[in-house]
Amino acid sequence: MRNASLWLLALAGALLLAFAIAYGGLRSSAERIEAERLQDHVRAVQIETWRVLSALEDAETGERGFVITHDPEYLAPYESGRQAAQAGVEELSRLTAGDPVQQLRVEALRQASGAKLAELATTVALGRGGDFAGAVARVRGGSDKRRMDEPRAVIEAIGAREEAELESRRLSLADAAQDEKTFIYAMAAVGAAALGGVAAAVVRAAKAEARAAIEKEKAKRQALTRLAHAQRMEALGQLAGDVAHDFNNVLAAVQSAARVIARRPDDPESVSRLAQTVSAAAERGVGVTQRLLAFARRADMLTETVDPHEVFASLREIISPTLGAGVEVRILAAPGLPKFETDRAQLETVLTTLATNACEAMAGVGVLTFAVAPCVDPAQLRPGAYIRISVSDTGRGTSPEAPARASEPFLTAKPQGLGLAMARAFAEQSGGALAIESAVGRGATIHLWLPLKQEKSALARLDAAEEPAGAPLAADRV
């Protein structure tokens, strides 16, 4: 009788152990599948929201290109962006069908993007009707930016909601998993006790296993935190790659425009030279795209010795035709500027981007000034010799709070945020710094400091050099 009881106890213990193992494996697999499904859903919603925003920006770029150049070819990106934005909103509606809160936000996005597209359509209609002056007036009125801020705010709310829902479900799954693990451990302990017959040993083993489970859960949470950080970095890299791809498309349009100009030689010599300049700028733009992609891969800088006079002479040839006849480009450089070491391609990219931002701030009409001078011991940096490049415009300027956030990546739909973030990263990676001065109605000045590879005593002779016109920071000794 006793042997029969022991056999029954052993069988019951074996069955409990087998059930615990099988159930634990099935639950672990189900949790992993659910976690992956949630992550894929959130990623799909976030990618679709950014696609809608990018499509709206493409439509706005095409509208402005058409209004400024009167070239109907710019209506192609406008039409494709408009269609892509509408399709993206419908896809978001499908993806969030099970979430009433998100459905309300998607409907708000539909209305905001529709209002933005209607604004663009009105401006394009004026241009198609030959009233380009009226179209330009609408663009300068500033309503485009306000219309773009509304869908952006909704998109950010949708993304934040998805992240919050994902975190809430993760915590729920973790709590449920802990309860199930406790149940499984209890069954395993009973089974082990039935098989082994040594209660004390089973208790000690259960305690050790429980401690290991807690440590494992802690390690799992840490791994999830690292995974979330890696996913954010991946999203940033993907967004930078998308921006680079869009910029490459714009450069392809510039090359096409250059070929069109070359085929219409009303003034063969000047038009041909202009076509070559535009083509050269487009080639530099392709290099910019490659450097954006390289920046996403954290490529090193390729430094060389450069002559600032030569750099700015080349820069004038590139940007003057690009900015248009309404922008006067002035280059003020102290005589005898020393050469310095930097990545020339990245420097030209930064200066071209700052010039483009300034042109947009001036709405295509104003004075753009590059002032270059040596300086010693600027307050923003450790003591030493530096070259200071100041880029000033006569645009609308900003409030005193805006410069503090101006270099945050992806702050606005315009390239200012990304351009200033790249400029600051370039300056700091070079061992220098970037500062912004601006006031409403008084334009803006961006100061860029790059180190000189010379001793301070060797640069002292430059203290008496002629100071370029402009407003140097009080902390500089030029």
Image (cartoon, rainbow, N blue to C red):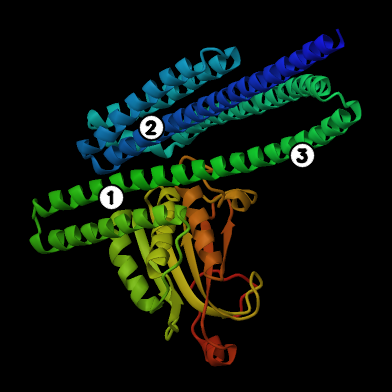
Element on which disc 2 rests: helix
Q: Residues within 10 Å of mark 3 (few under 14, many from 20)?
A: few
Q: Is residue 445 visible to the viewer in this orientation of the structure?
A: no
Residue under numbered circle 1: 251
Q: Residues within 10 Å of mark 1 (few under 14, many from 20)?
A: many
Q: CA distance from mark 1 to mark 3?
A: 54 Å
Q: CA distance from mark 2 to mark 3?
A: 47 Å
The answer to whether marks 2 and 1 mark residues whose Cβ atoms lie closer than 8 Å is no
Q: Is residue 298 left or right of residue 157?
A: left
Q: Residue at x 27, y 38 (%)?
A: 66
Is 156 located above or below residue 475 in the figure?
above
- Relative to the observer, which residue lies in front, 468 or 377? 377
Quadrant in the picture for residue 221: top right
Residue under numbered circle 2: 55
In the rendered image, residue 366, in percent from the top left (x then y), is placed at 40, 55
In the rendered image, residue 26, in percent from the top left (x then y), is placed at 61, 20
Please report whichever mark, 2 or 3, sits nearer to the chain's N-terminal start: 2
Residue under numbered circle 3: 215
